[in-house]
Image (cartoon, rainbow, N blue to C red):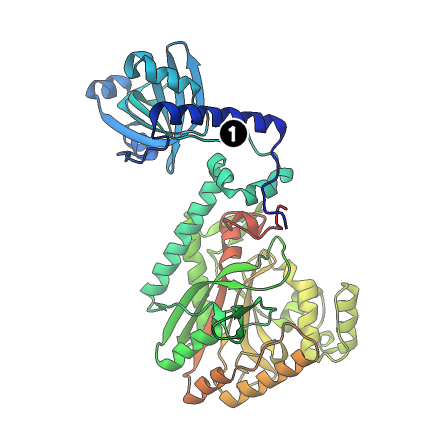
Amino acid sequence: MDTTSPTPPLDENKLIAERREKLAAIRAQEGVAFPNDFKPANRAADLIAKYGQLTNEELEPQEIAVSVGGRMMLKRTMGKAAFCSLQDATGRIQLRVAIDNVGEEVYSQFKHWDLGDILAAEGTLFITKTGELTIKVTTLRLLTKSLRPLPDKFHGVSDQEVKYRQRYVDLITDEEARKRFRARSAALGEIRAFMVANGFMEVETPMLHPIPGGANAKPFVTHHNALDQAMYLRIAPELYLKRLIVGGFERVFEINRSFRNEGISVRHNPEFTMMEFYAAYWNHHDLMDFTEQVLRHAAVAATGSAALTYAGREVHLDKPFARLTVRDSLVEHCGLTLAQTEDKDLLRARILAAHEKAPAHWTLAELQFGLFEAEVEAKLWQPTFIIDYPVEVSPLARASDTNPAITERFELFITGREYANGFSELNDAEDQAARFQAQVANKDAGDEEAMFYDADFIRALEYGMPPTGGCGIGIDRLMMLLTDSASIRDVILFPALRHEG
């Protein structure tokens, strides 16, 4: 497979060649082409926040000395003086570069520097006649020569793949992209702090598993040479985290990367981030209450409010989340009566009419869940917990003590998408072993997403696991919601893409 970058357009090739010539001249004249001895004392945003509201009469006489480093984004030259905009991690600040202040040699060099070059500037602050905080430059140096021209701008969907593939260019040129990922970082930091404040211990579990488990999904397979055995990239950390509950850590969580060898869409990436947390002596009701709190906390951290707007519609994380059983959701959103939710033929016909599959062997509970997926899920815009899932689709969840046909499980839906999945954990080792055996039978029948039999996990349960609640929250989808992003690729710095070659 070709691993080279695509050939740039002819105009771009010419510009790159010109910049390489400039770099060659710098190497010949100065020796050190990429100096590494400069440390900026100031950041653009800090200077603007502190001095940007002053008048020039208040500011310039103070002769406040500053130094900044960053990428030159704008430049306009007017005879013996020029203005340019320097961008660092916090924002942009204007520089005034004049021959009287920097000298004829530096000014001559500056005129040949290009947008995208990284500069070091020292000088004093003043306010221009248009009211913009500006550095009157006395010392100016080129730190890094940019060999590729920055794009003027991105134009809609046709350039989306360029934004994802060359995220570094996207971040240089799009302040909204930078804001999205700052919001993601802030939300993740606050989620971690919130979990710790509520008595959870952050842990790390393996990414390479000898047996894939914890979810119904197709794994990525690799081979460990020294052990001479197949290994699987984790599809979920669940079974390891529950081993820790057995070991006596009563509240654990992990914000992890998981991998599923499945389709790519606006909601799916082969590697993704989720948080799973487990608490001894909690049930699914405790988990739902706590999950509400986690999402509200993350929203406030990222946006300042739990009342959000997504795709032009309001989303209320600030209000109590609705709770519906699978059957009740069919009544509320499909127009069925309770009696009709018990009619297998009617349910199968509705599923098939929605162009979904409804195998002949499906039980009533599976048909109810199948119609929920076909017709209801996409309608759940406001936060809604769906509860009372059938045992057949919940191989790791604890069955209800009052109704063994359903499990103490929930899924959280917002904007028509699943955001969290949780349940009272199955801690009956014999029941879990039987469910694993059923999954193995499904795998033998051709179901690539069915689970393996994990003998070590069964052994762990045989030592005894206290009553436990566990939940997984999709972090990438949550970040889509918090940043009003249409695609999961907008909130993953480097999403999976087909190779350029």
Is 298 in front, or is 200? 200
Furthest residue to the left? Answer: 62
Query: Image height check: is 144 above or below 284?
Result: above
Residue found at x 66% / y 63%: 376
Is 344 in front, or is 239? 239
Query: Image height check: is 337 above or below 298?
Result: below
Quadrant of residue 123 within the rendered picture: top left
Q: Is residue 213 visible?
A: no
Q: Position of residue 323 (x, y in %)?
A: 55, 68
Residue found at x 24% / y 21%: 59
Q: How many marks?
A: 1
- For label 1, the crowd category at 10 Å Cα-Cα, with few meaning under 14, some 14 to 19 and many 20 or more, is some
Query: Image height check: is 257 above or below 82?
Result: below
Quadrant of residue 56 within the rendered picture: top left
Which secondary structure lies at badge 1? loop
Furthest residue to the top? Answer: 79
Query: Image height check: is 197 above or below 403?
Result: above
Residue found at x 35% / y 76%: 249
Q: Is residue 164 found left or right of 468 in the rendered image?
A: right
Quadrant of residue 340 within the rendered picture: bottom right
Q: Is residue 425 visible?
A: yes
Q: Position of residue 460 (x, y in %)?
A: 44, 84
Q: Position of residue 117 (x, y in %)?
A: 42, 29
Is 270 in front, or is 328? 270
Q: Is residue 490 found left or right of 43 in the rendered image?
A: right
The residue pinned by badge 1 equals 149
Q: Position of residue 453 (x, y in %)?
A: 56, 82
At label 1, the amino acid type is Pro
